[in-house]
Image (cartoon, rainbow, N blue to C red):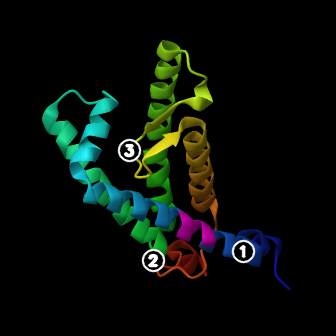
Amino acid sequence: MTSGTESSSSPSPKGRIFSLIARCVLGGVFVYMGIHKVLHPVEFLKLVRQYEVFSHAGFLNWVAATLPWFEIFCGLLLLLGIAIRGTALLMVTMLVPFTVLIFLRALAMHQTGGMPFCAIKFDCGCGAGEVLICRKLAENVALLVISTTLIFQTKHRWALRPNLLQQAIN
């Protein structure tokens, strides 16, 4: 029989399966998005420029050149089960500002064009082409929920790098 602390730190079989599926989905999405951007660097640079966040051309080029590779790297880490919590945290730090930027750009288009908000459609730079903005915001929220869930998972089954802290305690 296990003590209460052991059972609370050990996820259920459903939780472990969810963690594996979440890692695969999130990692696969980020690898796909990154590869699409790497294969189309000029188009991605133009899309990054449309957000008007970076005014310095050198910094804009640096972001457009490194972000896709960073997304691929993070996606592969999740698929391989390496540094899951840290990678999920990095994904949250990428998704939150990007989601806010998408929302603000769509809101500006809504206010200037008078279109219904959910009818607004543009290429956000994620690699899926033109998307309906409400659908993209919902997808990003789902990815944020998945990432946050991975951050707070206590154990990750089928991960290449086991939880070192847990090993030290045992």
The CA span between labels 1 and 2 is 21 Å
Residues under numbered marks 1 and 2 in contact, where contact means CB atoms less than 8 Å apart: no
Quarter of the image with the C terminus in it: bottom right
Judged from the image, the secondary structure of the residue bearing numbered disc 1 is: loop
State the residue in front, 42 or 80. Answer: 42
Q: Which residues are magenta?
A: 21-25
| Other residues around mark 2 within 10 Å, as few (<14) / some (14–19) / many (≥20) | some
Q: Main secondary structure of the magenta part?
A: helix
Quarter of the image with the N terminus in it: bottom right
In the image, residue 23 above or below residue 42: below
Q: Position of residue 6 (x, y in %)?
A: 75, 75
Residue type for callout 2: Leu
Q: Which mark is residue 68?
A: none
Q: Is residue 130 left or right of residue 50?
A: right
Front position among marks 3 and 2: 3
- Residue located beneath label 2 in the image: 80
In the image, residue 138 above or below residue 87: above
Q: Which tag, 1 or 3, sits closer to the chain's start?
A: 1
Q: Is residue 140 left or right of residue 66?
A: right
- Residue located beneath label 1 in the image: 10
Q: Which tag, 3 or 2, sits closer to the chain's start?
A: 2
Judged from the image, the secondary structure of the residue bearing numbered disc 2 is: helix
Q: Position of residue 45 (x, y in %)?
A: 24, 42
State the residue in front, 53 or 35. Answer: 35
Q: Is residue 155 visible?
A: no
The CA span between labels 3 and 2 is 26 Å
Residues under numbered marks 3 and 2 in contact, where contact means CB atoms less than 8 Å apart: no
* Residue at position x 45%, y 77% in the image: 80
| Other residues around mark 3 within 10 Å, as few (<14) / some (14–19) / many (≥20) | many
Residue type for callout 1: Ser
* Residue at position x 53%, y 75% in the image: 163
